[in-house]
């Protein structure tokens, strides 16, 4: 972030080139504020809860937290009072978190969609392959004098076709 700010704060010597970085500066400020908000949430929340949730937004003192599952959302709701106390203590004690004035926590479950599993068509053996497997099974039976579990399995595989 410092490198980006340094690059944007430099002025160009060429007067024909005038760049307007105001939109980018606003975006960089929002990204920095969001990063600080997430760091504040991670510092206050228990490790497991912090790993499975995300501080989404802070407006009018309401922190919106997106939880990965209903279990995490319930854990946040049950420990909401202690989390608010920890967030307020962090705001007082840590200079970086002074802008994170949280008075309420709103929890939302972030649903993740799973793609449908791909159903693969069964693969079939060619006639040549099944004949080769039968021949191998018969050779094994002849070698082992009629007692070979591998030969039995090979015959089953060859007959599947």
Image (spheres, grey):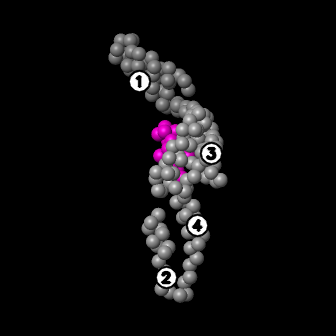
Specify the farthest residue to the top. 146
Q: Is residue 59 above or below residue 72?
A: below
- Disc 2 element: loop
Q: Which residues are magenta?
A: 37-54
Local SS, label 3:
strand
Image coordinates of residue 107 in percent, x first then y, are: 63, 42
- Could you tell me what secondary structure mostly forms the magenta stretch? helix
Vertical position of residue 127 compared to residue 85: above or below: above
Whichever of labels 4 and 2 marks the residue nearer the N terminus, that label is 2
Q: Which residue is mark 4?
A: 26
Q: Position of residue 131 (x, y in %)?
A: 48, 27
Q: Secondary structure at mark 4?
A: helix
Q: Nearer the viewer, residue 83 or 161?
A: 83
Q: Earlier in the sequence, mark 1 or mark 4?
A: 4
Picture mark count = 4
- Whether residue 138 is visible, yes or no, is no
| Residue 78 position within the rendered picture, expressed as x and y whole percent measured from the top left | 59, 33
Tell me the number on the disc at residue 136. Answer: 1
- Neighbourhood count class around disc 3 (C-alpha, 10 Å): few under 14, some 14–19, many 20 upward: some
The residue singled out by tag 2 in the image is: 12
The CA distance from mark 1 to mark 4 is 73 Å
**How many residues crowd around disc 1 within 10 Å: few (fewer than 14), some, or many (20 or more)?**
some
Q: Which residue is mark 3?
A: 104
Alpha carbon of mark 4 to alpha carbon of mark 2: how far? Answer: 20 Å
Q: Nearer the viewer, residue 87 or 74?
A: 87
Q: Which sits earlier in the primary sequence, circle 3 or circle 2? A: 2
| Dots 1, 2 in contact, CB < 8 A | no
């Amino acid at each position: 972030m410092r490198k980006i700010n340094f690059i944007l704060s430099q002025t160009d010597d060429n007067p024909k080139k005038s760049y307007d970085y105001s939109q980018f500066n606003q975006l960089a400020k929002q990204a920095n504020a969001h990063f600080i908000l997430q760091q504040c949430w991670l510092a206050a929340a228990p490790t497991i809860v912090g790993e499975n949730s995300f501080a989404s937004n802070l407006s009018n003192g309401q922190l919106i937290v997106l939880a990965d599952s209903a279990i995490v959302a319930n854990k946040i709701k049950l420990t909401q009072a202690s989390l608010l106390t920890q967030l307020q203590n962090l705001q007082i004690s840590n200079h970086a978190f002074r802008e994170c004035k949280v008075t309420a926590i709103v929890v939302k479950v972030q649903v993740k969609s799973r793609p449908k599993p791909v159903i693969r068509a069964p693969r079939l053996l060619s006639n040549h392959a099944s004949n080769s497997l039968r021949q191998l099974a018969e050779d094994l039976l002849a070698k082992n004098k009629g007692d070979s579990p591998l030969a039995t399995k090979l015959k089953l595989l060859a007959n599947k076709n």
